[in-house]
Image: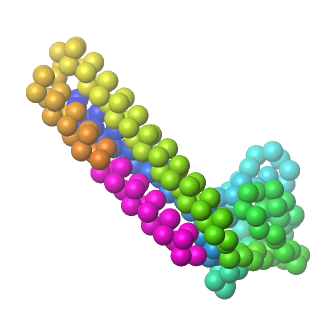
């Protein structure tokens, strides 16, 4: 494997780690209604045991700043959606009128905001650790290639440096996303 291939693979894997972090942030309540709060909620539709993301089963809209409306494409899954929302850790009580579900997003207390800020910080650290693990794996592959004689010492040093620069870029991005989400949570 050439150093360019190793760096490209590392970049793709770091990008995925940041994507996972972004999805996790979308599901955190900020005191404002947003479709991202519920769109990745897993629903056991039709009782088959396989879970489907809510966004594939229903149209999700935000008609008011404190309200989410979920309109299933098939009314038969309404009860399954309601059950999943009740059993989730969102702390929202669904109101079902037989055709759609309304969720009132109450304002958050200071204690809830603090707990969410801690959760964001932990998730950002997890994402950074994932990126560091990708760097470590890439460096191992590069060192193996150098020992096998396919890379020179200079190429190895340049590739490791490039990998470090890439890691810094992704860590900074995760930090910025975490700071932005923490500000949203604190502002409410």
Residue depicted at x 31% and y 44%: 167
Which quadrant, please, contains the C terminus?
bottom right
> Horizontal and vertical percent for residue 182?
50, 65
Q: How is the image coloured?
A: rainbow
In this picture, is 109 found above or below 62? above
Residue depicted at x 71% and y 54%: 42
- Residue furthest front as drawn: 111
Which quadrant, please, contains the N terminus?
top left
The answer to whether one can see residue 144 in this image is yes
> Horizontal and vertical percent for residue 29?
63, 66
Residue depicted at x 53% and y 50%: 123
- Residues 168 and 2: in front is 168
Q: Is residue 36 magenta?
A: no
| Quadrant hosting residue 107 | bottom right
Which secondary structure type mostly characterizes the magenta part of the structure?
helix
The answer to whether one can see residue 73 in this image is no
> Horizontal and vertical percent for residue 131?
40, 41
In the image, the segment drawn in magenta is: 169-188
| Quadrant hosting residue 146 | top left
Q: Is 106 positioned to the left or the right of 76 in the image? A: left
- Residues 90 and 121: in front is 121
Q: Is residue 187 magenta?
A: yes
| Quadrant hosting residue 176 | bottom left
> Horizontal and vertical percent for residue 67?
70, 80
Residue depicted at x 77% and y 68%: 92
């Amino acid at each position: 494997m050439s150093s360019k291939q190793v760096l490209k693979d590392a970049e793709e894997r770091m990008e995925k780690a940041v994507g996972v972090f972004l999805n996790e942030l979308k599901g955190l309540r900020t005191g404002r209604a947003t479709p991202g709060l519920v769109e990745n909620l897993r629903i056991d539709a039709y009782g088959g045991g396989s879970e489907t993301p809510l966004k594939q089963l229903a149209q999700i809209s935000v008609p008011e700043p404190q309200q989410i409306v979920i309109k299933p494409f098939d009314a038969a899954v309404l009860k399954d959606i309601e059950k999943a929302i009740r059993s989730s850790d969102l702390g929202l009580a669904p109101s079902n009128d037989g055709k759609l579900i309304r969720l009132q997003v109450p304002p958050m207390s200071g204690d809830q905001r603090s707990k969410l800020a801690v959760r964001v910080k932990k998730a950002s650290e997890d994402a950074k650790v994932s990126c560091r693990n990708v760097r470590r794996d890439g460096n191992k592959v590069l060192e193996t290639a150098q020992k096998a004689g396919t890379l020179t010492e200079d190429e190895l040093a340049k590739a490791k440096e490039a990998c470090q620069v890439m890691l810094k870029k992704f860590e900074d991005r995760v930090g910025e996303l975490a700071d932005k989400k923490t500000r949203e949570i604190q502002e409410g």
